[in-house]
Image (cartoon, rainbow, N blue to C red):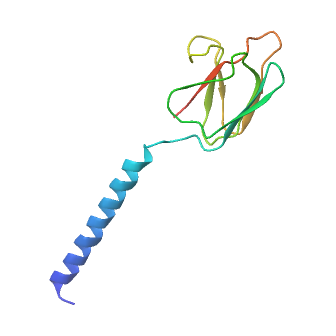
Amino acid sequence: MPVIDRRRRRLGIAAQAVLLTLTVAGCSSLGRTAVGPVIYTTEKDAVVEVNSPSVKGCHRLVPEGAKEVSNDTLIDIILYPTPDCSGPGTTYLATTFSDVNAPSAKPWRSFSTVH
């Protein structure tokens, strides 16, 4: 095989690798989600499941809040006692962990992801 053909083949493979990398990198930021559910129990003992929430922004829980949260996603979350993911009194909840609020504590009203 001539030297020129080998160079063309290598350049072709390199160009394809670069294009594939750019395609994957460009698409990975679109619609990224925390794969899996966030499951919580409300103050009225209703169980709510949020499947694969977006990794961006603040996610509100039901108005009465949650007393127990289970993070079964592949990403950590932060729980907030306010509906807008602000203020003190947050709880860091790692992936595959659950947390139960103390009876005297304020319920959680929102969460955001750690990414």
User: From the viewer's perspective, is 38 left or right of 4?
Assistant: right
Residue 30: % across, % down: 43, 43
Q: How many marks?
A: 0
Q: Position of residue 3 (x, y in %)?
A: 17, 84
| Nearer to the camera, 36 or 14 | 36
List x then y, in percent, for residue 90.
Answer: 64, 17
Question: Where's residue 24, x and y in %?
Answer: 40, 54
* Rendered residue at 62%/43% (across/down): 74
Which quadrant does the N terminus fall into? bottom left
Q: Residue at x 51, y 27 (%)?
A: 57
The image quarter in which residue 81 lies: top right
- Which residue is most to the bottom? 1
Near-viewer residue (112 or 52): 52
Query: What residue is shown at x 54% (from left), y 41% (from top)?
Result: 33
Judged left or right of residue 75, residue 8 is left
| 98 horizontally vs 27: left or right | right
What residue is shown at x 51% (from left), y 35% (from top)?
115
**Extreme residue in the left direction:** 4
* Figure quadrant of residue 96: top right
Q: Is residue 53 above or below residue 28?
A: above
Left or right: 50 with respect to 112?
A: right
Above or below for 109 versus 50 = above
Compared with 4, 83 (above or below) is above
